[in-house]
Amino acid sequence: MAEAARFPYVELDSVLGAASSLPYLPLTLTYNDRSLAVSGLVDSGATVNVLPFQIGEQIGAAWDRQTTAIQLTGNLAGFDARALVLSATVGQFSPVRLAFAWTHASDVPLILGQVNFFLEFDACFYRSQSYFDVRRKEHPR
């Protein structure tokens, strides 16, 4: 069985304290030869991974070169989104390719959702103890 990496919940508002804590995962995204350290909200209720526009720009992606349109729903339904595949490194795990809906929205967190973060990693949340574990999917030999 693969080893799990443990991460603390991140408190977003000191006034609200623990009530504002969320499972943000530190990871490094790589596109072409450019890397960027970011944090993503691990969201088991999100259907897809979502990449905010400014992070895509910072990593060197060109909006006009991404030709596959993605239709987002919910709060992001009114924003254009394009498919963008990046290499992602979480902790000491080997890099994995993550597919993102790169949205033109800027006021949105980087979201790690079912497609395809949860297809590559298992996550176990211990909210009452303010930490979560992430384990890389074991591939058949």
Image: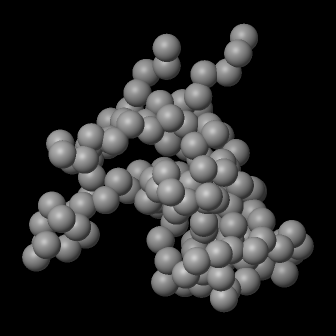
Q: Is residue 78 left or right of residue 1?
A: right
Q: Is residue 97 left or right of residue 75?
A: right
- Give x and y (percent) for residue 70: 78, 71
The structure residue drawn at horizontal position 24% and vertical position 61%, both measured from the top left corner, is 21
Residue appearing at x 45%, y 53% in the figure: 42
Q: How many marks?
A: 0
* Image position of 89 with respect to 38: above or below: above
Give the quadrant of the C terminus. top right
- Compared across the picture, whether 134 is left or right of 61 comes to left
In x, y percent, where is residue 27?
48, 50
Q: Nearer the viewer, residue 120 or 46?
A: 46
The image quarter containing residue 137 is top right
Q: Furthest-bottom residue in view?
A: 78
- Residue at 38% across, 56% down: 24
**In the depicted view, which residue is nearer to us: 44 or 6?**
44
Question: Is residue 37 visible in the rendered structure shown here?
Answer: no
Coloring applied to the structure: one colour
Q: Residue 55, can we see it? A: yes
Q: Quadrant of residue 139?
A: top right
Q: Nearer the viewer, residue 57 or 14?
A: 14
Q: Is residue 102 above or below residue 44?
A: below
Q: What is the x, y in percent for residue 37? A: 48, 58
Between residues 104 and 79, which one lies in front from this camera angle?
Answer: 79
Give coordinates of residue 107: x percent, y percent.
49, 84
Quadrant of residue 97 within the rendered picture: top right
* Residue at horizontal 56 percent and vertical 54 percent from the top: 113
Q: Residue furthest top?
A: 141
Give the vertical position of 129 relative to 93 (above or below): below
